[in-house]
Amino acid sequence: MILQFFLQDFMLNAIEQKRRQRLAEGKEILSLVSGNPCEQGIYFPMERLQRIYGEYFKKPDYQPHPKGLFIAREALAEFYSKLGFNLSPENFILTSGTSESFFHLFRLLGKAGANFLAPRPAYPLFEHLADLARVHLKFYDLQEARAWAIDFESLEKAADQNTAGLLLISPHNPTGVVASREEIKTLSEFCRQKNLPLICDEVFSDFYFQEGLCPRPGALEDFPLVFTLNGISKRFALPMMKLGWMAVGGDAACVDFVLDQLETYADTFLSVHMPIQRALPDLLKYSEDFVENYVEEVKRRKNLAVKFLKTIPKLQFKEPEGGFYLTFKVLDKVGLEEETWVLKLLEQTGVLVHPGYFFDYEKGVHGVMSFLTDPVILEQAFERIKNFFKI
């Protein structure tokens, strides 16, 4: 009986079942759902990676620091100073990735049963991490009618006496919206009023398609406590190397206490392998040319997706301001559930997109796609989508 209940919690949805069935039958799938740069033909220069990463093995040793090697944290402090942050190496904690960072913060800031305020549409991973940490999410809305602007009224309503923190994803996955300076200022005032920490996921911040630097809360406003989360997975197209970090800022007393606690958490696991810590300073120092070209390529693919979408009148969308993903609203097929039209698209054309309900869209029929997709696949897929909506 226990196994039966366990399996019921992990039943495959109909879309994943159909995808696996097509693969088993040898049928083609044009997937528009992956945000993994390596799957889309984007790689960090291998010779450079071998040189930078291989330095460790000329004289391998293991003298870990719970926060991460000082030379790595020192390099991060210098890197962030160019983005407007005023942080010392002691304000950084290295992790094996942003998921681990979130888990540590959920466990540290929230007692069992506490809640964190998260934006909706919502990336599904956060709910899984919250469940593992024995906390839960409450949602504030991004308003589609206002180009996915933050609905501060819903934010106020969501907060209660059990709220332990506020999440901001900017650039946002899956809408591609970036929090404005005005929104960040209002969030700062909200956090001050409620005495709440801000956890800002900035993994897509290098992929900002507007003029100037991506607005970053940790550099712009006075929060009581602010955690800036990022890593090398997106910036350097190195998801396999498993390195992330938390930059901790805010009121000195809060920051010192939290850093002590996080150091204990990190010391418990020591999850970040030594060679990549050693490599981080050189990755940050010698990779600007790669990052610049990489960002331009992502912009090119975004522009290609936008151009294709504009040829399909039955799909409505806001051009993304950053990241790898965009959302579109289906203006016809309104009589169909989201899962139904995504299944029909997959069955009839072989094109796979995510349905909006994966991200907790509450109104309308939506789809979500990654414009990081290889341009050849992107063009083929959009031609099939265009024909699908002519039916």
Image (cartoon, rainbow, N blue to C red):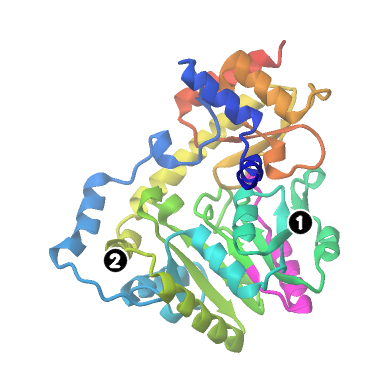
Counting every numbered tag in the picture gives 2
**For numbered disc 2, what is the local secondary structure?**
helix
Q: Is residue 62 above or below residue 363?
A: below
Is 157 on the left or on the right of 211, as rendered? Answer: right
Is residue 328 visible to us here? Answer: yes
Residue under the point 57% across and 22% down: 351
Is residue 352 visible to us here? Answer: no
Q: Callout 1: 10 Å neighbours few (<14), some, many (20+)? A: many
Q: Is residue 257 above or below residue 297?
A: below
- Write the start and end of the magenta stretch as one range: 173-198
Q: 22 or 286, which is in the foreground?
A: 22
Q: Is residue 15 above or below residue 291?
A: above
Q: 28 or 205, which is in the foreground?
A: 28
Is 300 on the left or on the right of 180, as rendered? Answer: left
Q: Which residue was labeled with disc 2?
A: 274
- Based on the displayed image, in which of its 4 quarters is residue 324 positioned? top right
Image location (x, y in percent) of residue 296: 45, 42
**Residue closest to the far bottom:** 253
**For numbered disc 1, what is the local secondary structure?**
strand
Q: Which residue was labeled with disc 1?
A: 139
Image location (x, y in percent) of residue 278: 28, 66
Q: Earlier in the sequence, mark 2 or mark 1?
A: 1
Q: Hey, what amino acid is under mark 2?
A: Met
**What's the CA distance linking mark 2 and mark 1?**
38 Å
Q: Are marks 2 and 1 in contact (CB under 8 Å)?
A: no
Q: 35 or 97, which is in the foreground?
A: 97
